[in-house]
Image: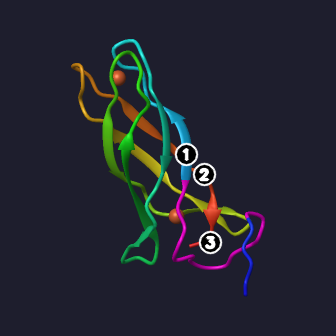
Amino acid sequence: MKRVSKDSFVQGFVPDHNHGSVDYTGVADGHVHQCLDVTSPPIQTHDGSHIHYTEGYVMYEDGHFHYYKAYSGPAIVVGNGMHVHYYDFYTSENHGHKHHVKGVDQPAPGNK
Ligand SMILES: [Fe+2]
Ligand SMILES: [Fe+2]
């Protein structure tokens, strides 16, 4: 059995993995929300890379929360057998505003 720890160098594509992220939304209407996310497993793309789907709610703040559904960008190899994904999306509009969320998620095993 092959053991994979977060420090293992993993060559190629790992069919089952997801990515976490801890981020804040952009400011809108004078506040931000914390966004704690875990993506779906990978969705393979025609060019041999993969993306991830995610949906959820940002944290309750200022009397409301927002919903989001988004796809990440393709895998970005960051060395040591790991990769990350860029994300850039807007939340749902609630209380007359929406928030921009963009950044890079946490590295996961696989260099493809
Ligand atoms: Fe808000
Ligand atoms: Fe990934």
Q: Quadrant of residue 95?
A: top left
Where residue 3 sits: x, y (%)? 74, 78
Q: Quadrant of residue 50?
A: bottom left
**Disc 3 CB within 8 Å of nearest ligand 2 atom:** yes
Residue to which mark 2 is pinned: 106
Q: Is residue 24 left or right of residue 83?
A: left
The boundaries of the magenta stretch are 6-19
Where residue 30 sits: x, y (%)? 39, 12
- The dot on residue 21 is 1
Can you name the residue that lies furthest to the right here? Answer: 7
In this picture, is 111 found above or below 1? above
**Disc 2 CB within 8 Å of nearest ligand 2 atom:** no
Q: Secondary structure at mark 1?
A: strand
Q: Secondary structure at mark 2?
A: loop
Looking at this view, is 25 or 65 the one in front? 65
Other-residue count near label 1 (Cα within 10 Å), few / some / many at <14 / 14–19 / ≥20:
some
